[in-house]
Image (cartoon, rainbow, N blue to C red):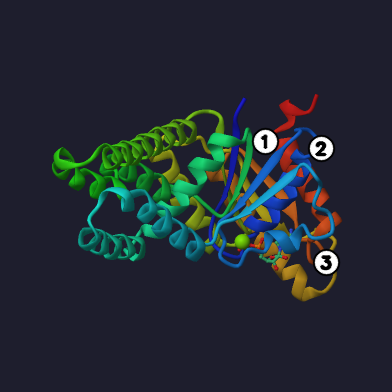
Amino acid sequence: MKKLWFFTGKGGVGKSTLACAFALELCEVFPKVVLVSVDPAHSTSDLLADVGPKNLELFEISPEKEREFFVEEAIETIRPFLKPDVLKRGEKILKDLSLSPGAEEILFIDSLSKIVASYEVVVVDGAPSGHTVQLLRRSINTGLWISSLIEAGKDLARDWDPKKKEAYERAMEKVRQREIRLRTLEKTLRSKEAVFLPVMIPENMSLLETLRLVETLKKLSLNVGPVLVNRLLPEDAGSSFLKEHIRLQKEVLQRVKKYFKDIVTLPMLSKEPKGELLKTLGKSIFKAVAHPYRL
Ligand SMILES: Nc1ncnc2c1ncn2[C@@H]1O[C@H](COP(=O)(O)OP(=O)(O)O)[C@@H](O)[C@H]1O
Ligand SMILES: [Mg+2]
């Protein structure tokens, strides 16, 4: 059984905090849980520093490393069957491709497809948004990356010796495998197995952003779970300054309830939510989105 949860929303609303909290709670139920972070700041390892259970595996995806890895791997794949001058040009094309707009997301999709192919229970912190899912489609259709270069080698293949032909076949097989992996990822993302969890804070701006985000996700026929309204101030918080904040948050919360049937509110904690403190937040999210898995 595959299960994927995506925490999505604008920066600063609590995606990393809640994704870590939720992953911790899942570790109580599943033998193995994977947490994938695409936030360049990678706060996940800090958040989990004191509590990281053994059955939690963390992948912090860095665009730089992914880019380097992609170029290296692609060059090694095409090296055995391309002439040195063609290879040199190929190398330049690959480097340029890896720096082109949208490349970071495509590289992320590639890494995610590998992770999803190998693990059953996956929590993603920070992405993919609707935009990333659209990119997934495009990435499959264009067969971008090494495939175009490998295709270009096809006409040359007639004069090749058996060794080069073999290397070419191996490269083609890699491309086919990648395509299968991406198609599987797309299928999984669009299935009931994947749940997108929009995270917001009780402020009007955040509500407007969330409405747009949910609309995009729904247009893509993705499965949207409850909206997580994070950092709700406790009713009994002290001063008049805070009381005004509480009143404003309540107002927004009423509006949130008008737009979304299914919401989960998470309290603003008095301390920075880290380590053990994450557990209270994790339990509330788990109850709302994953309780059927508690045996
Ligand atoms: N429920 C909460 N109570 C108190 N502080 C919170 C809560 N959720 C998040 N924070 C704090 O808000 C900040 C942003 O959270 P973070 O998880 O890094 O957001 P994101 O990943 O969406 O950018 C962090 O300093 C975090 O400690
Ligand atoms: Mg984050």
Question: Disc 1 marks which amino acid?
Answer: Val
Residue picked out by circle 1: 289
Q: Which mark is residue 101?
A: none
Which residue corresponds to the image point at 22% horizontal and 56% vertical from the top-left?
A: 83
Disc 3, SS? loop
Whether 45 is drawn above or below 1: the answer is: below
Q: Which residue is mark 3?
A: 271
The image position of residue 216, as x and y in percent, is 41, 46
Residue 141 quadrant = top left
Which residue lies at the image location 63% right of the left edge and 59% below the top edge?
201
Quadrant in which the N terminus is drawn? top right
Mark 2: which amino acid? Glu
Residue 62 placement, left or right of 110: right
Say which element carries label 2.
loop
Q: Nearer the viewer, mark 1 or mark 2?
A: 2
Q: Alpha carbon of mark 3 to alpha carbon of mark 1: how far?
A: 25 Å
Q: Decide: few, some or many residues near mark 2? Use Cα within 10 Å; few <14, some 14-19, many ≥20.
A: few
Q: Are marks 3 and 1 in contact (CB under 8 Å)?
A: no
Task: State the separation of the CA atoms marked 3 and 2.
Answer: 24 Å
Say which element carries label 1. helix
Q: Which residue is mark 2?
A: 28
Give the mark, 3 or 1, whose residue is nearer the N terminus. 3
Q: Nearer the viewer, residue 208 or 276?
A: 276
| Place of residue 276 in the rendered image (x, y in percent of width and height, measured from the top left) | 86, 55
